[in-house]
Image: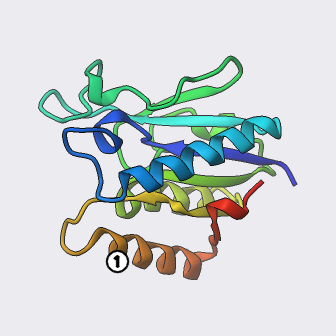
């Protein structure tokens, strides 16, 4: 099975000071390890970058907008303006029709959720990397929000797998 690693909004504004997500250190380590294993396996990698408005911490061109990991030759960056990384972007064209998509990144209940559901809608098998996605404590503890998203996505057909068990 061919797989593509999709790293959603792994940007400085959510993983580095001044306002990282509560689990930033652990999630960042899990994402970095996942990325390293994917690259070692020769797996295609696509980075999705959110382009916030001028007053947002991820406003285009600001330090918070920058990706945490360096993009290597042959890897792609998709810039988006909505939680669904397929909406108004070329993401669908970058994914082979039979590819399964391994999803990790920020924020669980927004962009991770919407992009995972959209990938299912495009006919892709989707694997969510548990431990490699996170959010803020908005409306409840971040860990609870991420867990609920995992349950919802699993019910929709996403396979939720420990990040350390992938690749």
In the image, is residue 127 above or below residue 157? above
Determine whether, in the image, residue 138 is placed left or right of residue 119: left
Residue at 78% over, 53% down: 167
x then y, percent, for residue 128: 59, 63
Residue annotated with mark 1: 144
x then y, percent, for residue 75: 66, 26
In the image, is residue 40 above or below residue 4? above
Residue situated in front as seen by the camera: 50 or 12: 12
Determine whether, in the image, residue 91 is placed left or right of residue 67: right
In the image, is residue 59 above or below residue 134? above
Residue at 46% over, 54% down: 27
x then y, percent, for residue 72: 64, 21
Residue situated in front as seen by the camera: 76 or 66: 66
Determine whether, in the image, residue 52 is placed left or right of residue 114: left
Dividing the picture into quarters, in which one does residue 108 lie?
bottom left
Dividing the picture into quarters, in which one does residue 155 lie?
bottom right
Q: Residues within 10 Å of mark 1 (few under 14, many from 20)?
A: few
Residue at 19% over, 39% down: 18
Determine whether, in the image, residue 148 is placed left or right of residue 13: right
Q: Give SS at disc 1.
A: helix
In the image, is residue 82 above or below residue 78? below
In which quadrant will I find the N terminus?
bottom right
């Amino acid at each position: 099975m061919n797989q593509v690693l999709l790293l959603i909004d792994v940007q400085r504004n959510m993983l580095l000071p001044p306002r990282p997500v509560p689990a930033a250190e652990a999630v960042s380590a899990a994402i970095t390890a996942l990325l390293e294993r994917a690259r070692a396996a020769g797996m295609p990698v696509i980075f999705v970058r959110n382009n916030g408005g001028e007053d947002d911490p991820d406003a285009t061109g600001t330090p918070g907008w920058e990706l945490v990991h360096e993009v290597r030759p042959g890897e792609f960056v998709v810039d988006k303006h909505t939680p669904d990384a397929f909406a108004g972007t070329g993401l669908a064209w970058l994914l082979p029709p039979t590819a399964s998509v391994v999803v990790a990144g920020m924020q669980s209940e927004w962009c991770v959720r919407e992009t995972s559901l959209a990938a299912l809608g495009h006919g892709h098998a989707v694997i969510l990397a548990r431990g490699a996605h996170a959010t803020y404590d908005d409306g409840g503890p971040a860990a609870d929000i991420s867990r609920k998203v995992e349950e919802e996505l699993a019910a929709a057909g996403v396979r939720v797998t420990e990040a350390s068990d992938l690749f």
